[in-house]
Amino acid sequence: MEQLTGTFAARKELHILLVDDDDGDAKAVRRAFRKANIANEITRAVDGIDALSVLRGTGGKTRLAPPYVVLADINMPRMNGIDLVAELRSDPALHNVVVFFLTTSKDQQDITAAYNLNAAGYIAKETAGRDFLQLVNMMDRYWRIIELPATET
């Protein structure tokens, strides 16, 4: 198996926004990135409202600088992941944010809703691999082969 490089495809500037209200899962995802020697910055938001504040730089939050990828749970308080992505898609400044859903839900309605909102992927936590290592490996490979549009900061 190919070794991870330490950063996604040499994109050291890539930020990861993890949107998950579960402290245990958030720690496990961070641990998986650390274990794979991937040093990209991970910012955590606890729900959709918190994530929007981070992405927009509102509510006392420092705006997350692009490029970034969002890993969002679906089932969260205040604003769930589906509503978060619907809001992102309606915002001209955030409509093309790359979003992967990382969730416990295997509900077909959730999966359909996610892809209808142009999610880059839908990953069930239980299939993300032991300690989320398969998730990290998948994301590393993804960032090696894709091209992103130029971003304004």
Image (cartoon, grey):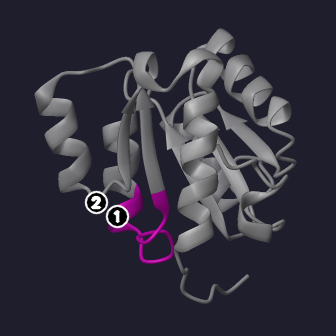
Q: Residue at x 53, y 22 (%)?
A: 129
The residue indicated by pointer 2 is 118
Labels 2 & 1 near each other (Cβ < 8 A): yes
Q: Please, which residue is most extreme toward the front here? A: 1
x%, y% of residue 9? 72, 67
Quick check: is 93 in the magenta stretch? yes
SS of the residue under disc 2: loop
Q: Nearer the viewer, residue 13 or 20?
A: 13
Number of the front mark, 2 or 1: 2
Residue 29 image-quadrant placement: top right
Residue at the spot of label 1: 89
Horizontal side of residue 86 vs 132, given as left or right: left
Q: Over which residues does the magenta segment extend? A: 88-98
User: Vertical placement of 87 versus 101: above or below?
Assistant: below
Nearer to me, 96 or 31:
31
Amino acid type at image mark 1: Arg
Q: Position of residue 89 (x, y in %)?
A: 34, 64
Q: Quadrant of the C terminus?
A: bottom right
Dominant secondary structure of the residues highlighted in magenta in the image = loop
